[in-house]
Image (spheres, rainbow, N blue to C red):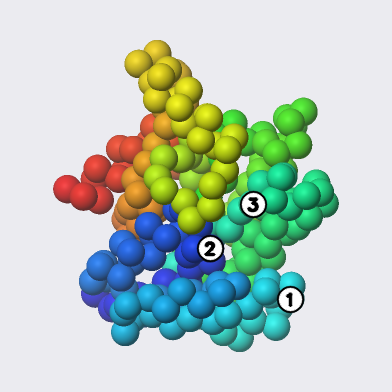
C-alpha cells in the first residue's frame, strides 16, 4: 500500500495533540503536515510544520497537499470574546478548509464537532457547529466525516473552569448514560483521536459519528 500524507490543523488542542502522536506512530503515513500558530517542535522526521495565523488560508492553499485532512480547530465563547469571532474559528475556518480540500482532491476530511450539534438549535454554540457540519457535507459529500464527541477528558495546555466542572458532573452521572443516552458519556480525547485515524484508514458507514460510536471505533483501531 502506498504511504499517505496527513494534513493536520489544530495539533496543539486536546484532540489534535493526541492525533499527532497517533499519526507519528502509524506506519501508513509517511508525512504529516501541521499548520499551527506557534511551533511545537515535534520529535519526528515525518513532521513538517507550517506556522500561520490562519487569517488568510487561501494563501496557504499551495502548501495544503495530502491524502487525509484532519481539522481539530476550535475555541470557546469566553476565549473568542465575541460570537462573531467564535463563528470565524468554529465555522469559517473548517468550511474554508473543506473548500480547499475539495479543490485539492483530498481523499478524506475529518472535523471535530460536538455532541448535540444542530443547525436549527436555539443555542448559538450548537447551531454554529450544526451549520458548519451541513456546509462541509454540502461541499465534500461522502469525503466528509463529522465526529461528535461528548465532554472531552484529558489534560489541556490551558485551564477551562467550565469544562472542568462539566467533567466532574459527567463522571458522576456516567452510570446513568445507558441505551440512547450512551452518546452523552464523557470520552477520552485519545479515544477520539484513534477513532478519527480508524475512519481515515478504513472508512465509516456513517458520515456523522456520535460519541459512543467513537468509543467503539477507538477500540477497533487498537485491536
First in sequence: mark 3 vs mark 1: 1
Image coords of residue 8 (percent x, y): 48, 68
Q: Do the residues labelled 3 and 1 touch (CB within 8 Å)?
A: no
Residue 20 pos. (x, y %): 38, 65
Q: Where is residue 158 in the image (x, y as percent from the top left)?
A: 53, 53
**Side (left or right) of 157 relative to 51:** left
Mark 2 residue crowding within 10 angstroms, few (<14) / some (14–19) / many (20+): many
**51 up-or-down from 173: above or below:** below
Relative to 156, is 117 on the left or the right?
right
Q: Residue at x 47, y 51 (%)?
A: 156
The answer to which quarter of the image holds residue 212 is top left
- Say few, some or many: other residues with alpha carbon within 10 Å of mark 3 (under 14 / 14 to 19 / 20 or more): some
Residue 41, how many percent across, how many down?
42, 78
Q: Which residue lies furthest to the top in this view?
A: 176
Residue bearing mark 2: 10
Please give the residue where the numbered disc 3 appears in the rendered image: 75
Mark 3 vs 2: CB contact within 8 A: no
> Is label 1 or label 2 in front?
2
96 left or right of 19 in image: right
Q: Say whether disc 1 or disc 2 marks the residue closer to the N-terminus.
A: 2
Structural distance between the alpha carbons of marks 1 and 2: 16 Å
Q: Examine the rendered structure and indicate whether residue 104 appears above or below residue 198.
A: below
Residue position for label 1: 56
Instruction: Name the residue nearer the viewer: 157 or 126.
Output: 157
Report how far apart the C-alphas of labels 3 and 1 lie in the structure.
18 Å
Q: Could you tell me which secondary element the residue under label 3 belongs to? A: loop
Of 163 and 95, nearer the camera is 163
Label 1 secondary element: loop
Query: From this viewpoint, is residue 125 visible?
Result: yes
Amino acid at each position: 500500500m502506498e504511504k499517505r500524507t496527513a494534513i493536520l490543523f489544530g495539533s496543539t488542542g486536546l484532540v489534535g495533540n493526541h492525533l499527532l502522536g497517533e499519526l507519528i506512530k502509524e506506519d501508513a503515513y509517511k508525512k504529516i503536515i501541521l499548520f499551527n500558530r506557534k511551533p511545537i517542535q515535534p520529535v519526528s522526521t515525518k513532521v513538517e510544520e507550517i506556522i500561520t495565523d490562519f487569517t488568510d488560508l487561501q494563501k496557504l492553499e499551495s502548501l495544503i497537499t495530502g491524502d487525509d485532512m484532519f481539522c481539530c480547530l476550535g475555541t470557546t465563547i469566553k476565549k473568542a470574546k465575541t460570537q462573531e469571532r467564535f463563528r470565524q474559528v468554529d465555522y469559517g475556518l473548517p468550511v474554508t478548509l473543506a473548500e480547499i480540500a475539495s479543490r485539492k482532491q483530498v481523499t478524506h476530511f475529518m472535523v471535530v464537532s460536538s455532541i448535540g450539534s444542530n443547525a436549527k438549535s436555539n443555542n448559538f454554540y450548537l447551531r454554529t457547529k450544526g451549520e458548519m457540519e451541513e456546509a462541509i457535507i454540502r461541499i465534500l459529500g461522502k469525503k466528509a466525516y463529522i465526529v461528535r464527541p461528548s465532554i472531552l477528558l484529558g489534560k489541556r495546555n490551558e485551564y477551562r473552569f467550565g469544562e472542568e466542572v462539566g467533567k466532574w458532573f459527567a463522571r458522576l452521572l456516567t452510570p446513568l448514560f445507558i441505551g440512547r443516552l450512551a452518546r452523552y458519556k464523557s470520552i477520552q480525547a485519545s479515544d477520539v483521536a484513534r477513532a478519527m485515524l480508524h475512519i481515515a484508514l478504513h472508512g465509516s458507514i456513517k458520515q456523522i459519528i456520535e460519541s459512543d460510536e467513537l468509543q467503539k471505533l477507538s477500540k477497533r483501531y487498537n485491536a
